Amino acid sequence: MNWKPQTEETAHSLLKLTGFGKALDDGQIAGLDRELVMAILDEAGRFAQSEIAPLNRAGDVHGCTFDAQSGEVTTAPGWKAAYEAFCAAGWASAAGPREHGGQGMPLVLSLALQELWNSASMAFGLGPLLTQGACETLARFGSEELKAHYLPQMISGAWAGTMCLTEPQAGSDLSTIRTRAEPDGKGGYWLHGEKIFISYGEHDLTENIIHLVLARLPDAPAGTRGLSLFLVPKVLPDGGRNAVRAGGLEHKMGIHGSPTVSLLFEGAQGRLVGEANRGLHHMFTMMNNARLHIGMQGVAVAERAWQKALAFARERRQGRRPGREGPVPIIEHADVRRMLLDMRVKVMAARAICHETAWCMDLARQAPDAALRAQAAERAALLTPVAKAFGTDVGVEVADAAIQVHGGMGYMEETGVAQLLRDARIAPIYEGTNGIQALDLVMRKLGLDGGLAMQRYMDGAARIITTAKETSSLAAVAERLAWALRTLGEATRFMGAAIEARDERAQASAVSFLRLFALFAGGLALLRGAQAEADAQRIFLAEHYAASLLPETAGLKLRIMHSGGIVSREALDILRGDTP
Ligand SMILES: Cc1cc2nc3c(=O)[nH]c(=O)nc-3n(C[C@H](O)[C@H](O)[C@H](O)COP(=O)(O)OP(=O)(O)OC[C@H]3O[C@@H](n4cnc5c(N)ncnc54)[C@H](O)[C@@H]3O)c2cc1C
């Protein structure tokens, strides 16, 4: 089945559910108006469909190959040509700052483009996503000399970027990173160490690869406060090959088209980016950007899976219905419709949360008023872990449901739906596992401004719900959301008290809390979508969401409040097998 670019849905979410549409109407976004935004989305959709989507299967089946002698990695047939076409068409430079040759698109729009690349092929979309994050980090923290030399090439896509954090003993906990950086006495550094699981760490798509690496200086403090960020190019400015090489390709469950390698730094020449020992802080610029984009990867795969399931359900005939002759298309069975509708609204909800987060990030950087910038930064910080975790969970859930809709054919590789699940499964793990996202939300973000950031979010939501209650067609949905908001409020107070009491139940319930928050935020987005367009279909989908997904929030609240046993001594003993 051919995937159809979801430009209309994206445009609805971008223009009606964030402040981006109004900002365009008010002429606040230099060089862009609604018409141009639509033209960009349409053209990106065409490119993704004609140039990238056809590679998706080849990337999965063929994967990448590694030459142990040269250490070179070759991507699947057709990938290099498609990547070159991608750069030549200017898509690589969409988000880059104008002063370094980029097009300076708002993040929210470049995120919408990322959705299209990743729906076409998640393994392909990952590369430009990482380069974009590396550019942003370098633009923010790099010296003028580094920026001048590297940014124009990276922004154009001629050179790619990576992020090198993970080591065998250092995954979620980066405090144990061992890679060392020794001063070379001339202002540079020699890097020694091994990184694993590095996406696009070696490949044939570009002539140079610019690694952003976390490492320790001599005498650096222990833990994350002793990490510094280094730029380590594969090819040095004098054209020589740097002492960094791929140790081998990782053999993965999915995204086979994306080369994931272990990287060996054997006295590789590097340059410090930003301040010594502030590397993790600087890397967080890249990680926050990348977390949001990974959330959108989940949405992108989910969209493709839902389209595929819908097409299959319209065609496949099984079973009978009273008054109809012969087997009917399975879409006529209520249980199949349940799956399809749940898939549809989850994708819409997760997309809207990602767009809202991106728009807050845009405002945090560019709003004219300092108070508005601060508020937007606070909201973006609150929503980023929600966007990452919910977007990627939805990716897996919807891809899984798509297999179920396909029945046995979903389990067969030739339908391509199994690939979507295999691909989507990495997203809740990389860029900080979803468990770590939930801890970030609960342990850091709930406490922003003494808890007032969350309160402001809930107050804003309450205002939207109150207004919606006045429209008769939306009153029922608004009522259910009001109830879910009270549930969220109770759960928030419970978590606040647990955190204050240093009760480990806060950590134990973090994932449930994030899910509750996300389900509410998604429902609010669908309500706003129905408010903005007032068409029967959007109202119906908001009603379906309110009736089918929001009830889960009640169970989550109960789980949060009553699952204290998880943190007991007994639980640990049982799991360890220590109980007699
Ligand atoms: C395909 C792929 C591509 C990747 N690309 C990159 C890349 O480009 N660059 C890069 O640097 N890394 C990359 N990674 C690594 C990835 O970011 C890590 O795998 C991820 O951060 C998790 O680390 P880990 O695998 O060591 O798991 P662990 O940290 O060992 O976690 C295992 C489990 O324990 C949980 N856990 C760990 N600590 C805590 C805690 N404090 N509290 C509660 N739960 C906890 C986790 O949530 C998880 O469920 C990639 C990984 C894969 C598989």
Image (cartoon, rainbow, N blue to C red):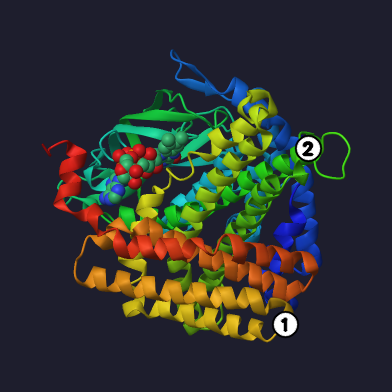
Whole-number angstrom distance, CA of label 2 to CA of label 1 = 44 Å
The amino acid pointed to by label 2 is: Ser
Q: Report which residue position mark 1 lands on.
A: 472
Q: Is residue 96 left or right of residue 327?
A: left
* Residue wearing tag 2: 50
Q: Is residue 310 above or below residue 369?
A: above
Q: Nearer the viewer, residue 505 or 47?
A: 505
Q: Quadrant of ligand 1?
A: top left
Residue 13 at x, y percent in the picture: 68, 64
Relative to 291, say whether 18 is above or below.
Answer: below
For the residue pair 422 and 139, the one nearer the viewer reads as 422
User: The disc labelled 1 sits on which kind of residue?
Assistant: Ser
Instruction: Determine the secondary structure under disc 2.
Output: helix
**Residue drawn at (60%, 31%), measured in percent from left and top?**
418
Please identify the quarter of the rendering in which residue 245 is found.
top left
Task: Please identify the quarter of the rendering in which residue 261 is found.
Answer: top left
